[in-house]
Image (spheres, rainbow, N blue to C red):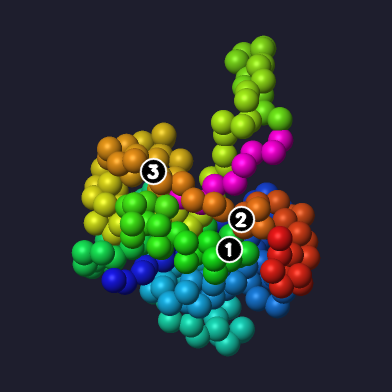
Amino acid sequence: MTHYAIIVAGGTGSRFGSAIPKQFLPLAGLPVLMHSITRFIDAQARVIVVLPREQINLWHDLCQQYTFSLPVSIVTGGDSRFQSVKNALSTIDATPGDVIAVHDGVRPLVTAEVIKNAYTEAAIHGSAIPVVPVTDSIREIDGDHSAAIDRSRLVAVQTPQAFNAAMLKNAYNVAFDPSFTDDASVVERAGHSIHLINGDTCNIKITHPGDIEIAEILLKRGKPC
């Protein structure tokens, strides 16, 4: 059984007001993306990194700058996250029992425990989607009106999302649909049930400038949360 990890990194840094894409921003001495890659290499996964074509040269320059030589394959991304994952899947010659995890490149704090559990549970159930409880109050907006929603029935979805390799490749053999918000939604559309597992509240996604500062603090704690 082989464990693959597709790490999707297509950010532009626009929300940061930065010319540097957020996956390349420095975090505790390394670009964010390098932290994410290292977590999966440590988990003995075969890593495929998906980057926009215009960012590939910059990535190679950063690898030289930081003497980063971990074994990864680079795949050119598409116009959407869906197409980027599809491009990466086309490079995987999976065998029965293989598991593929898809991870956001800007979730650098994913723990070894979450990664291991995702691969293990996906091998058993066909899929493994990490989630955490929603703790904020939630309201649904309908035009000029809004209504409270029972948050106890909601969870927030994280990555890595892991799947039986054949199942995931077959599920992606469709045209893009705007309702595909993540890999689980693609697999669910193909008629498969989705198995949820415990995520980690420290597995944050670097989205806004303040997230880098939070990630720095969490990294300094060793075992963040």
> Principal SS element in the magenta part?
strand
Q: Which residue is mark 3?
A: 194
- Looking at marks 3 and 1 on the same chain, the residue that comes earlier in the sequence is marked by 1
Number of residues whose C-alpha sits closer than 10 Å to that of mark 3, classed few (under 14), some (14–19) or many (20 or more): some
Check disc 2 and report the residue beneath it. 200
- In terms of sequence position, does the residue under pointer 1 or pointer 2 come before the other? 1
Looking at the picture, how far across and down is residue 109, in whole percent?
Answer: 62, 64
Element type at marker 1?
loop
Foreground mark, 3 or 1, reads: 3
Q: Nearer the viewer, mark 1 or mark 2?
A: 2
**Residue 110 disc label:** 1
Callout 2: helix, strand or loop? loop
Q: At numbered mark 3, what does the secondary structure look like: helix, strand or loop?
A: loop
Q: Is residue 10 above or below residue 222?
A: above
Residue 51 drawn in magenta: no
Q: Residue furthest top?
A: 144
The residue positioned 28% from the left and 46% from the top of the image is 171
- The quadrant of the rendering that contains the C terminus is bottom right
Q: What is the crowding at mark 1: few (fewer than 14 residues within 10 Å), some, or many (at least 20)?
A: many
Separation (CA) of disc 1 from disc 2? 8 Å
In the rendered image, which quarter contains the N terminus?
A: bottom left
Who's the residue at 37% across and 56% down the image? Answer: 122
Cβ–Cβ under 8 Å for marks 2 and 3: no
Name the amino acid, label 3.
Answer: Ile
Residue 114 visible in the displayed image = yes
| Labelled pair 1, 2 in contact (Cβ < 8 Å) | yes
Residue type indicated by callout 2: Asp
**Amino acid under disc 1:** Val
**Bounds of the magenta segment:** 129-136
Q: How crowded is the residue under tag 2: few (<14 C-alpha within 10 Å), some, or many (20+)?
A: many
Q: From the top left corner, tell me how far across and down residue 107 is, in percent.
A: 59, 60
Q: Could you tell whether 82 is left or right of 142 in the image?
A: left
